[in-house]
Amino acid sequence: RRRDETDTAGENISTPVHSGLQNPWPTGQAANNVNGLACRPRVKRKSFLILFLARKVPHMTQKRVLLLAGDFVEDYEIMVPFQTLLTVGVHVDAVCPGKKAGDRIRTAIHDFEGDQTYSEKPGHNFTLNADFAAIKETEYDGLLIPGGRAPEYLRLNQRVLEIVREFDAAKKPIAAICHGLQILTAAGIVTGRTCTAYPACGPEITLAGGMYSEIAIDGALVEGNFITAPAWPAHPAFC
């Protein structure tokens, strides 16, 4: 269960409450409710949308984002940003290597249920709306990389890494959440940069020459053209 129906928006709580747990976040953080209900004053942060929409693209009438995904991407982490961007009028092309528009990818639901790491269950199917083979990086203003299991194998695709490097070289916004950072580390673009991710990805960031920042589960971190977040409870700050 993703959200307890008895939760009340704005309720002041002293410890995280989720699926009956006292502390679902495996790193021991207890600053926030994992459903995004604050138990301390919230700090205003730049979100991916703010960072993205602040960019002026005079030659385009509509902002365009490329979303890289694959089978068993995290359910929330693909659907929530995808729909949020569409809501504010951003064009989003969701692609997967080896697939074309109309093809589906399977998603996975990662939840925090009292185990030493997240649990994993089948999620919704997600229909892609663009062809991976037809991607032209110059036609997009930002890149979005959700987490889940997909980044584990997407980072083995050289075209995926090439796309990521092109966005970074052009200083276009790159948003990666949870295990999405595995693609950034594989692309070799985190060296000397501070970013966050699901805690289990922290060592990968460090080994890739980056600086891992362990932040609250509902927080997001912006550095340069990067915006990163630990997991789907960060969507209000991330999106």
Image (cartoon, rainbow, N blue to C red):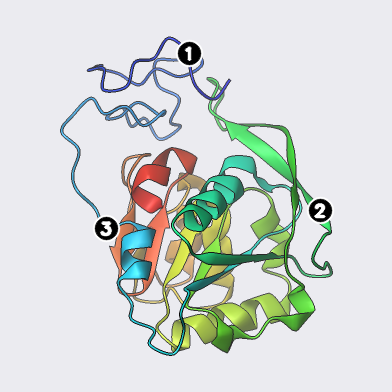
Q: Are marks 1 and 3 in contact (CB under 8 Å)?
A: no
The picture quadrant where one finds residue 172 is: bottom left
Depth check: give the residue in front, 205 or 179.
179
The residues bearing labels 3 and 2 have C-alpha atoms spaced at a distance of 32 Å
Task: Please say whether residue 42 is visible from this viewpoint.
Answer: yes
The residues bearing labels 1 and 3 have C-alpha atoms spaced at a distance of 29 Å
- Residue 5: mark: 1
Circle 2 sits on which residue?
104
- Residue 233 placement, left or right of 98: left
Position in image of residue 94 (x %, y %): 66, 63
Position in image of residue 12 (x %, y %): 22, 17
- Residue 46: mark: 3
Q: Name the residue located 75 percent from the left edge and 82 percent from the top edge.
A: 134
Mark earlier in primary sequence (3, 2)? 3
Mark earlier in primary sequence (1, 3)? 1
Q: Name the residue located 40 percent from the left edge and 29 percent from the top edge.
A: 34
Q: What type is the residue that disc 2 sits on?
A: Arg
Q: Are marks 1 and 2 in contact (CB under 8 Å)?
A: no
Q: What type is the residue that disc 3 sits on?
A: Lys
Q: Secondary structure at mark 2?
A: strand
Q: Name the residue located 77 percent from the left edge and 73 percent from the top edge.
A: 131
